[in-house]
Amino acid sequence: MEACEEWGCFRLVNHEVPLPLMMEMKAVVGALLDLPSHVKRRNVDVIAGSGYMPPSPTNPLYEALGLYDMASSQAVDDFSSQLDATPHQREILKRFAEAIHGLAMDFAQKLAEGMGLVGYQFKGWPSQFRINKYSFTPETVGTSGVQIHTDSGFLTILQDDEDVGGLEVMDKFGRFIPVDPLRGSFVINLGDIAQAWSNGRLRSVQHRVQCKEAKVRISIASFLLGPKDTAVEASAELISSENPRKYVPFTFEEYRKLRIATKLQAGQALELLRVKS
Ligand SMILES: O=C(O)CCC(=O)C(=O)O
Ligand SMILES: [Fe+2]
């Protein structure tokens, strides 16, 4: 809880996702991202921005494939079919999605307990999954692979590249701190929804990816987004006269649209939803 409040992120070790599954998953996503562009383009958006993101003028070295909703075995199957995944690749994608969704649910539950909320339910919260490839070159060393942002959802389970570093998180004083790779572990990031849901107690961490060396870097980010149909709002237990409500209630969908429309990617969109005092 201290890490979640002070930093909005931490490295998770001693979890139950088997190392061989993590390594096989890394190999599978590497192979999928190596597919020809016309195949990757079949991975179309289910919600805005959820599908294939080809290299762009702003981020020529970055591309990503995505899947919404990883808690749905049908969606995992559809994703696999779009990319002509082999039976082995399908099996790995399925097992990984199940394991990570389970971990996200467990961790969310622990966070709720840590906040003193009894019986809070995250059931039905959708999750999205994005596999990122950064094709760094000698010329790009020192530049940004992904610009500074916060994650818009509740929490992110990131399997960062176990060899190639570059992830940096911002501390409370605005300094970027490198997060060195650690094989077999995950980085947990809290996002904007966690900050609103906790009435500002949990911190949505600003982070970016820098190119440190001329290598291919692959990361697997799984986002537990937010409630599907109900509003994001801090529970009554967290509100008091000394600690009044900080954000107006909003739905995840509204928030996503706000982030896209305003192009405010580093947490400033949430500030627009602050209760005016
Ligand atoms: O590639 C990484 O390590 C981080 C990616 C990231 O921040 C994201 O996909 O939101
Ligand atoms: Fe992120």
Image (spheres, helix red, strand yellow):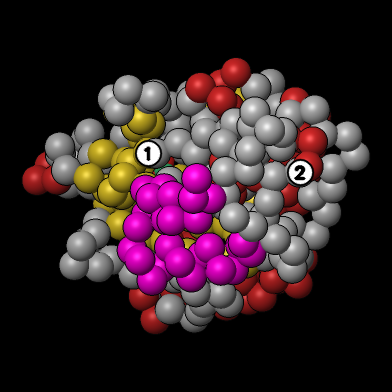
Nearer to us in this view, 53 or 270: 270
Instruction: Tell me which segment is drawn in magenta.
Output: 250-277
Query: Seen in the image, is 8 located left or right of residue 88?
Result: left
Please name the residue shown 30% across and 28% down the image.
174
Find the residue positioned furthest to the top: 2
Nearer to us in this view, 233 or 18: 233
Position of residue 65 relative to residue 106, above or below, is below
| Magenta highlight on residue 189 | no
Q: Position of residue 199 (x, y in %)?
A: 62, 39
Query: Seen in the image, is 175 located left or right of residue 8?
Result: left
Q: Position of residue 54 (x, y in %)?
A: 34, 69
Ligand 2: does it lie within 8 Å of the C-beta at label 2? Answer: no
Please name the residue shown 73% across and 49% down the image.
101
Please name the residue shown 26% across and 39% down the image.
210
Ligand 1: does it lie within 8 Å of the C-beta at label 1? Answer: yes
The disc at residue 207 is 1
Q: Which residue is mark 2?
A: 235
Q: Tell me which corner region of the image, top left, top right, bottom left or bottom right, holds residue 258.
A: bottom left
Q: Position of residue 133 (x, y in %)?
A: 37, 53
